[in-house]
Every structure is written in structure tokens, then in C-alpha cells.
Amino acid sequence: MDFSLFYFANNDTEESDRYRLLLDGARFADDNGFTAVWTPERHFHPFGGLYPNPSVTGAAVAAVTQRVAVRAGSVVAPLHHPMRIAEEWSVVDNLSGGRAGVALASGWHAADFALRPENYETRKSGLMETVETIRRLWRRESVSLTDGAGETVELTMFPPPVQPELPMWLTSGGTPATFTLAGEHGMGMLTHLLGQEVEVLAQRIEEYRRAHREHQPASAGQGHVAVMVHTFVGTDRDTVRETVREPFSRYLASSFDLLIKAAEAAGAQGADMSRELKSMGPEDRQFLVAQAFDRYFETSGMFGTVDDCMAMLKQLKDAGVDEVACLVDFGVPTDEVIGGFEHLARLHDTWRAHLGS
């Protein structure tokens, strides 16, 4: 089971050097045997808002690293023309010497589709068409497009990529159909533990493996599952709890506000949920956030000492996870996160030694 770094910052701080953690973390991952660095696509909200375009941040990661894979987690496919996705990530592939990889998502927040409102209703149905178009372009095949004069033209992507195939994942919060879809199309799976227990995740992974075996018989492997996990490692569990409590609670509260906006955008379908959430007073919201913090700290994150985190790693390994994507930028001050990297490196080395024992 591999280790990687994952970024999804809640940008509510006044730090001027906003990308220092990304770049210092990328160098750390590159130097300490980590597999990849993932950056997301988010728009119009502090929750993840440092990352409106993962190809831009991916290019920066590529420039300061030599070995680690550079990945999008995730490109919101319906917001972009497939040609643009292929072009931008071919640039990243060239800058990195063949280390690019992309997870694709259909998108869920209506506000994001202010960029391409016409694609909101068909965001799910058109996802796999985008995947297949990117694959064709990556193989240097031409596609038929309509130019500015209304003429049909055959166009090929430039620059040519380094890798013959672009590693691709689908992103899911736990929807069984998405796991199956990824397996059927020979893609990896990128998911998280927000809203799904490890036991449920294990069932989803088995469904993914089954679909991969049935629909990709020529493949030598059984696919690839990466799981995003909020991570902070230290030398004392209680100290870690108090270090992450306030920033992670802010992080959860910010995601709570985003959930309200999503419910409002869903119209009648989300009206009841939106009213219920908005009707909560400050004390009720604070109570919900506190409950969520306790649950995530105990069951859904890698928080605590190396020994504490080893227990979570064993659970994930038993569930069938191939890669743990450590989300490190959830609000703990940058200097403290960077200072904790030495403990994360020790966890990585301890896990490697455990696998070899």
C-alpha cells in the first residue's frame, strides 16, 4: 500500500505564502518514497479554493520534483472541453517526464457550473464520453470538432505526451455505481472516508474489483484504489488531538456551509435539507461539528502517534486499499504541518518495515 500527499485546503487563513505547504510537501514526498501528490479542482469557495485548476498546481509540483507522480484529484470533467483537459495534462506529463495522472469527477455543486451551466444536467451521463475522448487524444488519434466557421475539422492534441497511456481514476464519495463504472472501464478509483465507514468501503472495493475482472480480462492487475485520509502524525495522541481540534473543526464547519449551498442549489430536491440545516442555531451547529470531529478523529482519519496510525493503515490494507492519500492541509498552521512531516516519514518507513516482516 503506497503513500501519497493530498491537498484540499480550507483557505481561511491570512498566510501570504499560500502555496508553501504544497511545494515543500511535494519536495518532502519526492525525497521520502511517497508515490504521488494530488491537487483538486474547486471554485468559488474557501473550502478547496486554493486549487481552481490542478494542471496549474500540478505543473508547479512537476517543476520541484524528480520522481513523485503528479495527479489531479480531481478534474471536474463537465466544466472543460476534453481537448483542453488532454492538452493541459500533456504539458504536465512533459514537464514531469511522464509522471502525470488524472482523476475525473462529474461535479456535484451547482455553483461550480457557472463556468458551463449548459453541462449541469448532463454532468453524469457525459462523463465516460469525456474519458474515452481523452484516451483517444492521448493515443494521438484525431477527433472531429466544429471550428469557428461551423466546419467539421479533424484535430489532434499537442504537445505529444510522454506516457503512452494517461493513468486515470474516477472519483466517488461512496456511490456503488461509480465504483462499478470505474472497474468496467479499467480506471482507478479515488474515494474518501467522509460518509463511508471502512467496512462499507471494503464492500465497494470488492464490487470494483469484480467489475474490473469481468470487463478487463486482458489486464494484468485488478485496478487501483486510492483513499484520501486526513492526516496529522505526532509523538503524543492527546497533543495531536488538541493540535488539530480547532483547525479541523473549522474545516468541517466550512464543509457544512458548502453543504447548505449545495442543498439550496438542488432546488425542490434539497429544499427540506436546506431549511433544516439553516434552521439550526449556532449551538446546534457547534454540537454537530464537535460530534463530527470526534468521529473522524477516532475512526476516519490518521491522527495520533505512529502506532495509532498503523492501526488505521492495517484496516485500510485489509479493506483492499492500494494507496493512502494523506490530506495534510486542513487548517493546521503551515509550520506545524511541515514540522510534522518527520513523523509522517517515520510512519511511512514503519509501514514499509511491517510489510517486509
Image: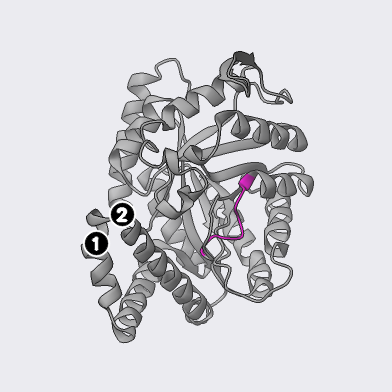
Q: Mark 2 points at which residue?
A: 266
Q: Quadrant of residue 329?
A: bottom right
List x then y, in percent, for residue 76.
Answer: 50, 43
* Three-letter code for the amino acid on which mark 2 is drawn: Ala
From what the image shows, is residue 3 above or below residue 180?
below
Q: Residue at x 60, y 62 (%)?
A: 344
Q: Where is residue 136 in the image (x, y as percent from the top left)?
A: 56, 19
Q: Position of residue 347 (x, y in %)?
A: 57, 60
User: Residues in magenta?
Assistant: 47-54
Where residue 74 appears, as percent x and y from the top left, is 52, 45
Q: Is residue 31 part of the magenta span, yes or no?
A: no
In this view, the residue in front, 227 or 125, is 125
Q: Which of 190 and 109 is in front in this view?
A: 109
Query: Looking at the image, can residue 141 be seen?
Result: no
Within 10 angstroms of label 2, few (less than 14), some, or many (20 or more) residues?
A: some
> Horizontally, is 167 left or right of 105 in the view?
right
Amino acid found under the numbered disc labelled 1: Ala
Q: Residue furthest front?
A: 149
Q: Does residue 305 appear anywhere in the picture? A: yes
- Along the horizontal axis of the image, is 101 left or right of 111? right
Residue 206 bears which disc, if any? none
Query: Which of the marked residues, 2 or 1, is nearer the chain's N terminus?
Result: 2
Decide: marks 2, 1 in contact (CB < 8 A)?
yes
Quick one: label 1, few (<14), some, or many (20+) residues within 10 Å? some
Residue at 59% x, 15% y is 151
Describe the element under mark 2 as helix, strand or loop.
loop
Q: How far apart are the two marked residues, 2 and 1, measured between alpha carbons?
A: 7 Å
Instruction: State yes or no: residue 52 in magenta.
Output: yes
The residue identified by callout 1 is 271
Classify 300 as above or below 105: below
SS at mark 1 in the image: helix
The residue lying at 61 percent from left, 14 percent from top is 153
